[in-house]
Image: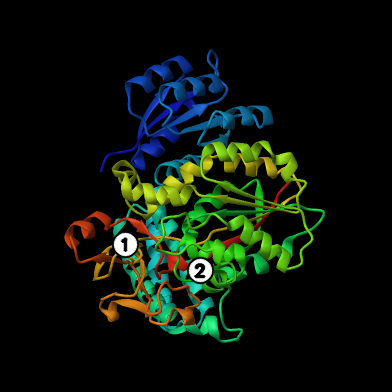
Amino acid sequence: MRKLKILWTDDEIEVLKPHIFFLREKGYEIDTCSNGNDTIDMVRQNAYDLILLDEHMPGLSGIQTLRLIKEARPEIPVVMITKSEEEEIMEAAIGSEIADYLIKPVKPNQILLVLKKNLEQKRFVTEKTIVDYRQEFRKISSMIDTSRNYSDWTDIYRKIGYWETELEKSADNGMTEILQMQEGEANNAFSKFVTNNYLSWLNNDNSNKPLLSPGLLSKKVFPHIDKNRPVFFILIDNMRFDQWRTISAELTGFYRIIEEDLYYSILPTSTQFSRNSIFAGMMPSTISETMPELWVPDDEEEGKNNFEEEFLKRQIAHKGLNIKWSYNKISNNQDSKKVNERIKSLLENDLNILVYNFVDILSHARTDIGVIRDLANDERAYRSLTRSWFIHSSLFELLKTLSAQRVRIIFSTDHGTIRVQNPVKIIGDRKTSSNLRYKMGRSLDYDPSKVFEIKNPDKAWLPKSNISSRYIFAINKDFLVYQNNFNHYAGYYKDTFQHGGISMQEMLLPVVCLEPIS
């Protein structure tokens, strides 16, 4: 194993020989230097893992040397050692991106601790994370085996999501693979739970059922409307819970989370059904029956979500809300910038709805564009790409601006997505819907043991194009492929992110209330 190489710069380096001997005995390779100019030369000529840098030196000061180090080798962590506790010096050092700092006089164990913290943290994190997950593995397995209701499954999904992000910090891919296997077992059990209970949630008037898409606005948004405080409801299309967690980490320092909950998307977990239901406050069949001019059948080419503003208008009127509101759909950066330019007028509204389509666009682009598929080749990369979009987006700029106002922000989504693995062969006619995670048609042939079938769409409050139409839904990581040219399409769509079926990722969705910290 290669020794970690340290450069220690101090104008009194001879006095520090006992410390240096101590660190060498602990296995570190130590080079020394007494001034800033020589330090820069050594940094350019050697590969150091970390630099210990005295702040107060003749000639180039520690701060000046630090800036030159960062210009030459910005990736090397620098620990500043200073005699002074003056705030101005600390701010200058921190602003120059130091990894850590110590106040003189320093003890050998202090130096050892800061080296371990900055150079061996990943190993320590890996070891602790592995131990902790091994302990949690059995607990999660027990939760899966004993789950009885919808809230049990939100607890399970939260735990699995937590360990997904924790194991990202680990260098042990084996534990990630074990978690993926456990997540697959959970999704199989979750799919059975949904197929056994979904229709009863829709048709029985009981309290033991989750919040579903049609009730999202009335239960989670409208109650927050306050004439003295604008509410911004931000819906990011096709955003999974783990993607929300990635975004929420960037909001630290601007907002505090007042409430973070999970609700259930209706089936199919696709924009046409779930999002229309959110804005109409109705199940799809009720929309198609009461507002047939606004419902576009599944087999038609016309856009399926062109009437969300009208649905919202009618739901607000039906609820008897006397409010000033706006609806904004953002599909590109130009749309987003236009919204940001209207902040002053939006703050005069009681409720502002903002629908961002970027994550959905990313999901489809990943399927169709090879370079995007390479950039987001698994869940971890998919989250990273979502974060990259968010931190550079006009939405983030909007949220930072709003954080200085007395507002309330509610984040949510209409459905999630899952990376599919297993093709399931089906047969259908030309009018069968094209979605890979669900099919609606009248001439469907399939293995009923591999799908969730709804022979009577009326029971699921779903519209039908024909009296004999039925719906089938893929479960876990399956996707539905026609038998014609089966091998080609099975290979093409494997490992793509799809939605419409039954999985925790598609159905269990974040709805989060935030308030500015300032």
Question: In what quadrant of the picture does the N terminus appear?
Answer: top left
Is residue 169 positioned above or below 295 on the image?
above
Determine if residue 109 is in view. Answer: no
Of residue 240 and residue 265, the one placed in the foreground of this image is 265
**Side of 323 relative to 459 (left or right):** right
Badge 2: residue crowd in 10 Å (few <14, some 14–19, many ≥20): many
Q: Give percent across and percent down for residue 487.
A: 17, 60
Q: Callout 2, which amino acid? A: Ser
| Residue in view at x 41 percent, y 60 percent | 300
Determine if residue 45 is in view. Answer: yes
- Give me the C-alpha separation between circle 1 and circle 2: 19 Å
**Side of 89 relative to 134 (left or right):** right
> What residue does disc 2 label?
265
| Residue in view at x 38 percent, y 82 percent | 455
**Residue 420: which disc?**
1
Badge 1: residue crowd in 10 Å (few <14, some 14–19, many ≥20): many
Q: Residue lying furthest top in this view?
A: 59
